[in-house]
Amino acid sequence: MGDGPPSIWEWIGRNWDTGRADSIRNLLTDHLTMSLVPIVLALVLALPLGLASVRWRWLYQPTTGLMNVVYALPSLPVFMLLISVTGLSQTTVIIPLTFYGMAVLIPAVVDGLNSVPDHVRQSAVAMGFTPLRRLLQVELPIAVPVVLAGMRVVAVSSISLVSVGALIGQGGLGGLFTRAYQNPFMPPVIVGIVLIVLLALVADGLLVLAQRLLTPWVRARKGQAS
Amino acid sequence: MTWLSSFVSWLGEFFGSGENWSGPGSIPVRLLEHLEFSGLALLLAVLIAVPLGLAIGHTGRGELLVVVSANLARALPTLGLLVMFVLLLGTASIWPVIIPLVLLSVPPILVNTFEGIKGVDPELRDAAYGMGLRGPQVLGRVLVPVALPLILLGCRLSAIQVVATTTVAAYTGLGGLGRYVIDGFATKDYASVVGGSVLIVLFALVVQVLFALAQRVTVSPGVSQRLKVR
């Protein structure tokens, strides 16, 4: 270790790419996989479930009720219970995070679709849109802001929640926290927290950008108002 | 379904063992510890966040603080924060662990209290002033009862958060139900891991039910629209 503890920059330089599984670079890649997969999966699953709950009203109460219960389950015991099924793998972290994401996104999809004004829907029908085309070209675009607001919550919390997986050896950057605790040393903790918060900020920023690109009419309307 | 049978036998081993029902590491003791730590953290968070949220919502000053704290609390990794506080302050008392628990549970209550107060129909507020109520009276008799569902939602979300984080905090030496999970995992005692996990999940669900009941009892029927107004 030379003389005295290394500075945080020295520590990063020395651990960035050691070729081992616990180099910062590899932890970062793992972290991205374990947070991005649940975010995407949650959206892919929440869209049809949300659509179904709007089409068949009676589905809505049981679905959101179940999702409220799921959301209340603490992550660590859920990871632990899943180990006996999926082992000490990334899947054990990805499955619960996907469900937490769905718990936020299903209500968002439903609220988004319900925010479509009735006259807009009727205009689409009157113009001869088929139900599928009406969904894709009219209803979903109008639902985008509400769904993306949910996505922002899901993205940021998934990215920070992955680190709890470190307690079962699958936490991406969270591995820096367990390493720092076992061998009391501050730089890994700081690096881990800063990288996770930065990742969350970048994901949030990208989603804001996506919203601007997907809903150009919102800006046009604001421009008119001013 | 081999995992199911081993799952059941682990549960039997955990809940059937006499050691787990008396002594310092027994289930009742761990349960009380979990209740004590998460209750303490939640209580402190409520004491900080509710007055602050009421003040910011009522005066409209400091909205930025609410937005920033909400986003930061979501982005900050709980495990990292716990390890950081323990490395900084040591483990001589439980406070190095309780402080991050409180920090993480303030924002959901703060945001929802603020949104609740801010979202009260302005006409309702004006009517209250018009009837001669003063600022604090308007807040206490009109704004708080109307905002109560959201304030309680904030407390419920914080409770979810705090029960989960107390579990994680066992890693940094805190007692409570997380001990079974963390220690069991370290010593490959899967009966302890599975039994502890089931206990924590049940604990979290009971807390949820209690909050749902609290909401029914405390929210005015007029506000919750259980009373049909004609």
Image: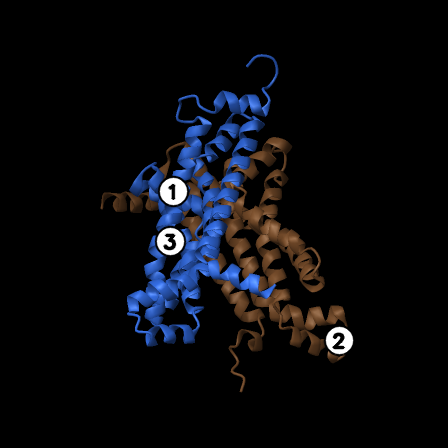
The amino acid type, in three-letter code, at marker 2 is Leu
Q: Left or right? Give the position of B63 relative to A209.
A: right
| Above or below, B228 relative to B18 | below
Q: Which residue was labeled with disc 2?
A: B133
Q: Nearer the viewer, residue B75 or B39?
A: B75
Tell me the quarter of the picture where residue B229 sits.
Answer: bottom right
Q: Which residue was labeled with disc 3?
A: A43
Q: Residue B160, how many percent across, how many down?
A: 50, 53
**Residue at far left of view:** B1
Q: Residue A92, how many percent across, how many down?
A: 35, 42
| Above or below, B89 relative to B60 | above
**Residue at far top of view:** A2
User: Disc 1 on helix, strand or loop?
Assistant: helix
Q: Distance from label 1 to label 2 (Cα)?
A: 53 Å
The amino acid type, in three-letter code, at marker 1 is Val
For mark 3, name the chain: A
Would residue B31 be visible to someone looking at this image? no
- Residue A93: which disc? 1
Q: Nearer the viewer, residue A132 or A106?
A: A132
